[in-house]
Image (cartoon, grey):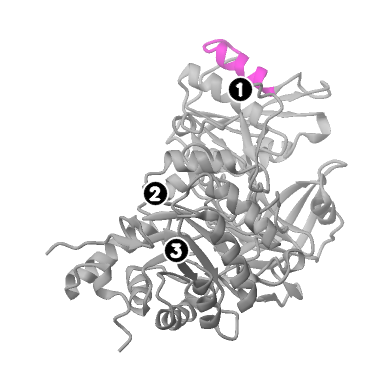
Amino acid sequence: MSINLSVNLAGIKLKNPTILASGIMGISAASLKFCEENGAGAVTLKSIGHNERIGHNNPTVYVWENGIHNAVGLPNPGIDGSIDKMSEMLNVLSIPLIGSMFADTIDNFVMVAKKMAALNPAIIELNLSCPNTADDLGRMYASDVKMTHDVVSAVKKIVGNIPLFAKLTADVTDIVEIGKSAEAAGADGLTAINTVSGINIDIYQKRPILKNKVGGLSGPAIRPIGVRAVWNLYQAVKIPIIGTGGINTGEDAIEYIMAGASAVGIGSGVWYRGIDVFKKVTDEMKVFMEKNNYHSIEDMKGIAHV
Amino acid sequence: MFNEKPVALLIKEIIIENERVKTFVIDGEMDFKPGQFTMCWIPGFDEKPFGLVSRKKSEFMITVAAVGTSTKALHMMEVSDMLGFRGPFGSAFILPVSGSIALIAGGYGMASLFNLAKEAREKGIDVHVFLGARNKDELLYLDWMKELGAVLHLATDDGSEGYKGFNVQVFEDWVKNEGGPRGGIFTKVYTVGPEIMEMKIASICWEKSIPFEVSLERYMKCGFGICGQCCVDPVGWRMCVEGPVINGEKLKQITEFSKYHRTASGKIEKYPWNKDK
């Protein structure tokens, strides 16, 4: 029996459903190529914004008992300082590149999207849900139905045929309303979920560990939250979903796919399993599919909705 | 032990090395291999990578120059204050089975090499240390290395101790005088310090076909291989996982070595001596 691991994500073909999530590695063409060599089906660059940012001071990332916690603060060279880098990425990669971007205002989203779209990445992903930049970038777009609609529709007009994904957060009253709003505004897909907002306090130092105090939780702790978000969105929208949050194994990936994800994002898994997490997850998915008689990812998509 | 989360540990003793540099002795175990580093959290300021030094199992040390806001804040701390430590992280140096090794250190590079010298001496390997600094006061750990029985070759910019000039020159002359009374060949060479110094040592070793390892420092955030800040071109290796210790053969593949590095925003910054376009 032949197993087909490839997926069609909003018209983009991936050789397997594992995607390097935004914010992990993703800083250079070389770092993304390293992920490709280790089996990723697609890679997402670290979010690029309207101007250069150095991000927060350390501690910005550390491992806690049930996951990873970060408030890196979107360091990036800005879109103008990233054009050459993105061109190089598109040159050296043989797998699809997802261009993640953010901005403060809708005008700046449009400005960044215009410059990024000119380079023609496979997909553009709007990071509408970074949980640790509220102090200077303001409230997350994905925390509000109207803000999500406005930014997605403004950017969709710019990017033309490039599929546009909106990355959402579960830190809202109802992620489904936000997802539906993005779909209605023209989004071609959703990415769910971003990291979950949290604080860990060092009781000996009597202060939060992260310099930014608040940061995004990822890893095994948030997997059921992500699966629930994908589950609810799958029932409400027709556009494909990249399921992200706590995927370390092939079984974890299949859980998201059975909840309705078309592909899966992997970030913290790079720490838990090593840089070859993509190959490991893909191999484990294959073993599960062989044992349980599934031929394709499509065979499993959403089937847990009984 | 390995610490994923910062562990709060007491400063047990503070050694004043010179007017800019202090060594903080920490009350706790850090089970590291020579060449590995720790992320030290200076509460309220920052968290930074430091080379690990240990002379007995129950304690370890970091040597810090007060150069920026956070290291100046660290210098203000006192015995019994607490710092947070994660790690140890990164790749380690590999010693030959026997023979004679050279350690070439500039600046605070000796912090990453001290325990390699200690382990080598315990295995009966001859250790030559080519140590360079601006002046006599900035030559680190001299007494400890004498105690180990390392052969010291010192160089200072102002000539206040040893050769007046760079330790690279002293090393080069020693290697050239192979067979002479003031010369010899090494089984393996290790270098940690400013990248321009490391480049010169690498060139000598490549030319003479001497196996060597360098410790390559890049801006770091996570320390455990996910943030991507310390990935090097064009191979994408993470200097906190695949590095910081890189052997001479692998180093040939890192084309950014001695040419440029990335800043906190991820922007490429050329080294001042790099005249390439």
Quadrant in the rendering for residue B134: top right
Q: Position of residue B49 (x, y in %)?
A: 66, 51
Near mark 1 (Cα within 10 A), the count class, few <14, some 14-19 or many ≥20, is some
- The structure residue drawn at horizontal position 43% and vertical position 46%, both measured from the top left corner, is A34
Q: Gap in Å between the C-alphas at discs 3 and 1? A: 40 Å
Q: Nearer the viewer, residue B176 or A45?
A: A45
Using the image, determine if residue A48 lies above or below residue A256: above
- The structure residue drawn at horizontal position 59% and vertical position 50%, both measured from the top left corner, is A114
The residue marked by circle 1 belongs to what chain?
B
Q: Which residue is mark 3?
A: A266
Quadrant in the rendering for residue A214: bottom right
Quadrant where the C terminus of chain A is found in the figure: bottom left
Determine whether the residue tagged by mark 3 lies in a helix, strand or loop. Answer: strand
The mark closer to the camera, 3 or 1, is 3
Q: Gap in Å between the C-alphas at discs 2 and 3? A: 13 Å
Q: Is residue B178 magenta?
A: yes
The residue marked by circle 3 belongs to what chain?
A
Q: In the image, which residues are magenta?
A: B167-181
Near mark 2 (Cα within 10 A), the count class, few <14, some 14-19 or many ≥20, is many
Q: Which residue is mark 2?
A: A36
Q: Quick check: marks 2 and 3 in contact, CB under 8 Å?
A: no
Same chain? Circles 3 and 1: no
Q: Is residue A89 magenta?
A: no
Determine whether the residue tagged by mark 2 lies in a helix, strand or loop. Answer: helix
Q: Nearer the viewer, residue A198 or A186?
A: A186
Q: Which residue is mark 1?
A: B200
Q: Quick check: marks 1 and 2 in contact, CB under 8 Å?
A: no
Q: Which mark is residue A141?
A: none
The residue marked by circle 2 belongs to what chain?
A
Quadrant where the N terminus of chain A is found in the figure: bottom left
